[in-house]
Each structure stands twice: as structure tokens, then as C-alpha cells.
Image (cartoon, rainbow, N blue to C red):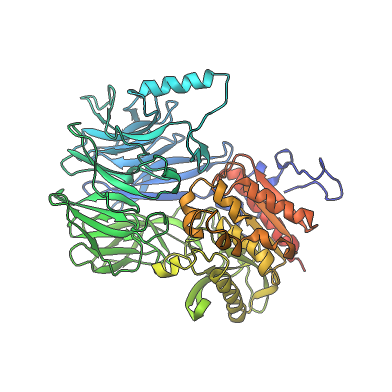
Amino acid sequence: MSRPSPALPLLAGLVLFAGCPAPSEASPMPATPAGQARGFTAQDLVMLDRVSAPQFSPDGRRILYSLRRTDWDKDRGIGSLMLTDPASGPGRPLTPEGMSVAAGSWSPDGRHVYFLSTRSGSMQLWRIAAEGGEPEQVSDYPLSVESYRLSPDGRAVALSFEVFPRCETLACTAEELEARAADKRTGVLYERIFVRHWDTWKDGRQSQLFLARFDEAGKLAGEPQHLSRGIDGDVPGKPFGDASDYVFSPDGKQVVFSVRIAGRSEPWSTNFDLFQVPVDGSAAPRNLTPDNPGTDTNPVFSKDGRTLYWRAMKRGGFEADRFALMAMDLASGTTREIAADWDRSFDALVLGDDGRHVYTSTLDTGTHPLFEIDLETGAVRKVVQGGNIGGFDIHGDRVVFTRDTLDRPADLYLSAIRARIAERRLTHYNAERLADVRMGAYEQFSFKGWNDETVYGYVVKPWDYQPGRKAPVAFLIHGGPQGSFHDQWHYRWNAQTYAGMGFAVVMIDFHGSTGYGQAFTDSISRDWGGKPLVDLKKGWAAALAKYDFLDGNRACALGGSYGGYMVNWIAGNWNEPWKCLVSHAGVFDLRSMAYSTEELWFTEWENGGVPWEVREAIEKHNPVNFVERWRVPMLVIHGQKDYRVLVEQGLATFTALQRQGIPSEFLYFPDENHWVLRPHNSVLWHETVNRWLKTHTAQ
């Protein structure tokens, strides 16, 4: 990207990227002659086709899946639905080109596919014949539909809307929003905290669950029935909840949903409970899990409707606790845990057609396989492995799933659960775009970390690796902190974008990472700068000893969120190896973070209590206390709409650097949150980071 010369100040150091033409603004395609091998680029990354959410048709003959493509000119992704028949050939588009859609699902009879779209101006429910044709809009509400789930017989649908709790109708909420928009006064009065969440200021609305019925023409008419009336909370939960938060019973007479009661404690509570409500409105919602202080979510009924399965965390206030698999006999209320001795955390649940097994994909030692769990005995068996198994569905003995790896974006695959049938790859998206791209080869390694416990990591070679030649290194530090840089294709922190510019990549799953047992995950709490730093140091030393192509004298460390915190911590406690640092959305001052973030349960669990009672614990590993030791050049990045780690944390980091005369830059996004999501901004992010790394690792 072209930039003003450092010798020519622009508005006292302000660089306006929006006003500077850049090659990426003219075209998202890398300028490389056809047929010539090249590395992977950020332009490649944002333009890739993204495959997700495969679903068998009710008869198992066809597979529906989602495809997201990037509209570069409009700076956004466009979702579509695809159909494939594995027995007869490649898939075909189901929804019209240019119509952005989301959340596709089969009708129970397999004749139609339903989905959400803003084609009519607001998000509404649509359907299209499975054989193709013109889509038809089936809802026309005054509010956008946030999520939906069809009833088992296909005659009704559960829908969620954002409404003002005092309103009796959807129109009431729409009218109130119009009145507020017309009001010249902009002040908002709040009576309790949690005034904003993730990237949105709250306006008093809550997501609530409703029921609507289809008429003879297949349309939704009239005012929907309010199923979650009287529930002070969001259904689905925010900011990332979806239709997996609620489910119909097999006979369609009941709905079970997950919700966290708001009240005054919402900012420091992780206590989601399961509520059951009859769809005929004969009773109010009833709490099924009042005794569990942690999260209860993802309800799934048995085939006969007598048993309810769900995922549960047992420790209130801890968002990274192990998700256990629970079962409740609905007649007696008796509850039991299934596979209690399996030291992994259950992810999304899919019930097998035989009713005797449930399937889940979850992190396991740096990979993300698919597992089968026997509901009676709790026996666990790995069904599909290799890379990152994403969305999946089961029909009979067959499983359809997406798989991605550190060197390949997701495609669709078909395999068998028990039959000895070779796995088949069903799609080959991005093959043409990546035909000339040579990815960096990678491998997992292990070493003795803190307390001599085994810790794992990955090393990625530069795309143009040559034996005997050393490469500069990007040392990536994952966020969470309870997360993992595993064998996965990542759309924000993608190792191949660094390998593609000639860097090697090292990534360590330090203590606190997920997929290595709950005790390993727990170990980071109240010790953010302790065990993880030991692991990073030992992992760096182990990688240098094992891989002779790593140039330890030309290395930069970079990370986001907790990874940004660790970069700030490294700046004052382990800055010797690094030529430069990159801190994205990083915590600078743990104390101010504890008072300013929205999800207080996170900081209170990680610090061991409220900030005025655990001052010593907070200050022990607080980056702000070691600023005088900083010396390494740092690029700081932050988004204005980041309410998890406020932009002031990034500004404070930049101030500390600038005031000490340490070479530094601040990349600011006024319209991004904790992540950078817009395609043009993503390319700008990568171009800025890549330039920074290249500048400071040049010979």
C-alpha cells in the first residue's frame, strides 16, 4: 500500500489510509503471472469461497449447504444455498445469484428449503422448492426475523425477534423505534450496567421467542404467539446465539429454550437455564435446570421425546468450563451425565438416526475431530479425524461434514460411520483461485513446558522454503485465552498469509489452551503472565532447536485479544528475541479492563474476584506496571466498536510507546469491533501488519 513518506508529516503524524489509493482497492487479485508459483496473500484470503452448514435432506438423497462469496465492490459477503446429490454429480445453486441468504433448512417433507433474507428490505423468512424455481417470501413482519426453527410437522415455526418487553405486538416495537429515530434528543438513560455488549449499545430491546403457523398457502399471517413472555433475557443469547438455543419436542407440542435471566446480575452471570413451554400457551415457561449455576444450552430431544439432552457447564461465572453432556428423563426429572470421564468439552450435538448415539466435534490435542458417544454406556469413539471438522450432519450410517486444515480452506466431505467405505471429497472450491499458490508445509511438535508438562505447537514453513535457507519468523499468540491455534484454516489469523510472504510461523498452545483436558485449560486463570509465558519461552527455544530454517534473529511476536495482552506483557518481560511486536485489541491495564469491559464474569473469574478485592492478583501480571522496560517497536491495532477490550486500551498502549520514543504505529478502525471483518479492512490490516514485519526483520 502506498503511504506518505515518513519525512513528510501529514497532519502531525496522521496517515489517512482511506484517502490513499492502494493496489488492493483497485483489485482483490494478486498481481502474479498465470502459471507462476506464488505465496498465499491477504487478497486471496478475503476472496475465498466459504463452505459451511451441510444438511442431509430428510430422505438422505441430497445435501444442502451454505456458500459465502465476497462481493469486493460492496465490501461484504454474499451468502447462498447449494444442493448436491453425491450419487449423480456436482452441486448446483439453489438460491438466485445475488440474493444474499442465511440459515437454510429443509422442510420436514423435503419439498422446500427455508432461509432468511433481506431481499424485501428487512430480514424475513423465505422458502424455495427443492427442485428450484423462484423463492417466495413467507413472512412479512414489521420487525426483522433474527432466527427460526421449523416444527417437526412443518406446520409451524419458532421465530425470534428483538422487541421491547412492554410491547404486546411486534408493531408496537416498530413504532417505538420509528419514534426514537424521529426524536431530536439523543440522550439515553440507563438504570443498570451492561449498557452495551460486544459491539452494540443496548436500547432496551430483548430477543424473544415466538410461534407462528403457516396458512394453506404456506404463508405466516397474523400476530405470532409470544412463547417466552415474562422471561427477562435474550432468546437466543447474545451476541452469538442462534437456533441451536431452542428446539421443538418431536410431537411439536413443547419448545425448550436456553436463556440467561438478565436482572441486575446479567453482566457477571453465565447461568443459562433450559426452560420448557407448551406451544398452545396453556402454561408459562418452566425452568428445567434451576440447580445448575453454570451454562445449560443446545437442547436436543430423543426420538421418542422422553429424554432431553443438552450441554452444561457446572461452574457459574466461568465461560471456558468443560461442556458436559447431560440427559434428563422428562417424566421424572431425573438427570445424569453421559461420558463424565471423557476429558474433552462437548461442542454442537447431533443425534444419530438410531437414537442410541450422539455426535460432536471438539478440540483434541491440536485437532478438531468428530466423535460418537454411546448414550447408554458413555463410550466415546473417534469417527472422523484430520484437520478441523466443522459443520456436520448424520443420516443413517453416513456423515457429511466440512474439513479445513492449516493449508486448505473448507470443503465438503462424505464418509461412513461404521461401514468400511472410503471418505469422499464432494466439493473443490477455490481450486482455480489457488491453482498457482504454494502453501507452506506444516507440522505439529511437542516439548516440555511449564512444570515439564507436555505442550504442543505448530510450525509452518515459508511457501518458498529451501533447505539450508533461514526464514524470518512470525510468532503467533492466540486469544481467548482459553483458545487454540490448531490445525484449522482461520479467516483472521491465518498462518499462510505470513508463510506467503516468506515468513516461517510458530504457534504454541500454552497452558490455558483448549483441547488438552480441563485442568490444562483451567491453569491459566489467575496466572495470565505466568505459566503461559514459560510455555512460550520454552516453545520458542524448542522450535529453534528443532527447525534449522527458523531465523531467531529476525522474529516478531504478534497476537490479538489475550494474544495482544501477551504481546504487551512480553514487551516488558521477555522482549529480547523480538525485532518487532504487533498488539491487536490487547489489554494494557487489567485494572481498568475489569471496570470497563461488558462481560464482567470474564474478568472476575480470571482475576479471582471483583477488582477492589483482588488488587494484588491484578497487578501481579498487569502490563501497565512494566512499561518502563519496553523497548521493541510495536504496531498497535484497535477497533472503536470493541466493547470487550475498549479502544482506550489500545490508545494507552500507543501512548506508552510514543511517550518513550519507541518506534510505533496505531492502526485504528472506527467501524470494526473486537475483530476486523470487512473485506477491505481485512486486507488493510494484513498489508499494514506485513509491512511492519518486513520492515523490522529486513537484513
For the view shown, which residue lies furthest in the front direction? 613
Residue at point 42%, 57% (across, down): 318
Horizontal arrangement in the rendering, residue 574 relative to residue 162 (left or right): right
Q: In which quarter of the image is the C terminus?
A: bottom right
Horizontal arrangement in the rendering, residue 637 relative to residue 489 (left or right): right
Residue at point 63%, 63% (across, down): 569
Against 566, is 215 above or below?
A: above
Horizontal arrangement in the rendering, residue 550 relative to residue 321 (left or right): right
Q: Position of residue 59 (x, y in %)?
A: 21, 47
Report the front residue among 6 and 423.
Answer: 6
Residue 196 visible at all: yes
Q: Where is residue 165 in the image (x, y as percent from the top left)?
A: 37, 29
Residue at point 20%, 25% (across, down): 216
Q: Where is residue 107 in the image (x, y as percent from the top left)?
A: 25, 39
Q: Quadrant of residue 9?
A: top right
Q: Position of residue 492 (x, y in %)?
A: 55, 53
Report the front residue among 95 and 297.
Answer: 297
